[in-house]
Image: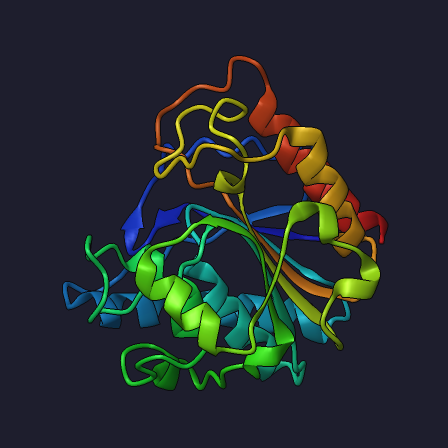
Amino acid sequence: MPTLHVPYHLDEHVPDLNVPLPPGADVAELTVDLPDADVWTRFAGLYDAVAESVARTARGGAPAAVVSGDCTVTIGMLAGLQRAGIDASVVWFDAHGDLQTLETTPSGYLGGMALRFLLGYRPDLVADRLGLRPPPVDRVVLVDGRDLDPPESAFLASAPLRRLSLAEVSAAALPSGPLLVNLDLDVLDPGELPGLRYPADGGPDVPALLRAAAAVLGSGRVAGLNVACTWHGGRPDPDGVRAHLVSALLTSLLAA
C-alpha cells in the first residue's frame, strides 16, 4: 500500500515536518508549485493534486494512506475518493471540532474550519474548484472533540453530526459505507506527544488512541486515512512516540 506524504501545514510547505515513516515503506512525497495567489487558490492547487493521487490509489482498489501536517488535506482526499466513485462517510478524530467559520472564528485559523468546509460551508472557496460534494451530516462522526468553542457547540447542538468518545468507538458505532478517516494526533494528551501546535489538555494516552483507531481501521471499510501530524516542524522525536504512532496506524490499515 503506497503512502502519500504531504508535508504542508495549510498552504505552507514544511520540509522539516519530520514525519517518521516506517523503514521500507512505499512512500511518495507530494510537493506542488503553488501560485503566488490567495490562500483559496493555493488550497485548490494543493488539494487537487492530493485528490488526483487519492483517486488513482482508490481506483486500484487500495485504501489511500496520507500523512500530512494538518486536517484540511482531508478535503482533497474526499474529493479524490469521489472522483474514484466512492461515496465515503467521515470519521474525524480530533481534540477540536474544526467547525468554526470565517464569521465565527476568534483566531482566523483556517485549520479550525476543516470539517466545516468538508460539510459544505462556503463551497465557492475550495470545494467547488475540486468538484467536492459534502457528505450527509448524519454520516459524519466526530471522535473526542473535547476542546470546542461556543459557536462549534451551538452547531453541534443543531446538526445531526454524531459525537463519540474514544471509549465509545466500535465497528457498530461507525457510519455506513466506505470510510474516510481523519486522525489528528492532537487528539492525544499533550503530555503524550510534545510539540503540538494546538495542544488540548485532558486527552487520552497512546494505547487508548490506538485501540480506538484499530476498531475503525480494522473494519475493512476504510477507503482513506489522513494521519494529521499537527506538530511544529523541526522538532525531534527522542522517545520514538511519533514513529510508534505513525507505524502502528499505517500497519493497522494495511492489515485490515
Position of the C terminus by quadrant: bottom right
Quadrant hosting residue 251 = top right
Picture layout, residue 122 above or below residue 33: below
Q: Foreground residue, 252 or 140?
A: 140
How is colour applied across the structure in the image?
Answer: rainbow
Q: Foreground residue, 246 or 100?
A: 100
Res. 5 visible in picture: no
Picture layout, residue 120 above or below residue 142: below
Q: Residue at x 82, y 60 (%)?
A: 171
Res. 164 visible in picture: yes
Picture layout, residue 167 above or below residue 235: below
* Left or right: where 72 falls relative to 64: left
Q: Foreground residue, 154 or 103?
A: 154
* Left or right: where 15 falls relative to 24: left
Picture layout, residue 135 above or below residue 175: below
Find residue 112 and report its horizontal and vertical position in percent. Answer: 34, 57
Find residue 108 and report its horizontal and vertical position in percent. Answer: 19, 57
Q: Residue at x 33, y 72 (%)?
A: 44
* Left or right: where 202 falls relative to 243: left
Q: Residue at x 32, y 65 (%)?
A: 151
Quadrant hosting residue 225 = bottom right
Find residue 88 and report its horizontal and vertical position in percent. Answer: 65, 76
Q: Foreground residue, 153 or 203?
A: 153
Number of numbered labels in the structure image: 0
Find residue 14 and report its horizontal and vertical position in percent. Answer: 33, 41
Quadrant hosting residue 45 = bottom left
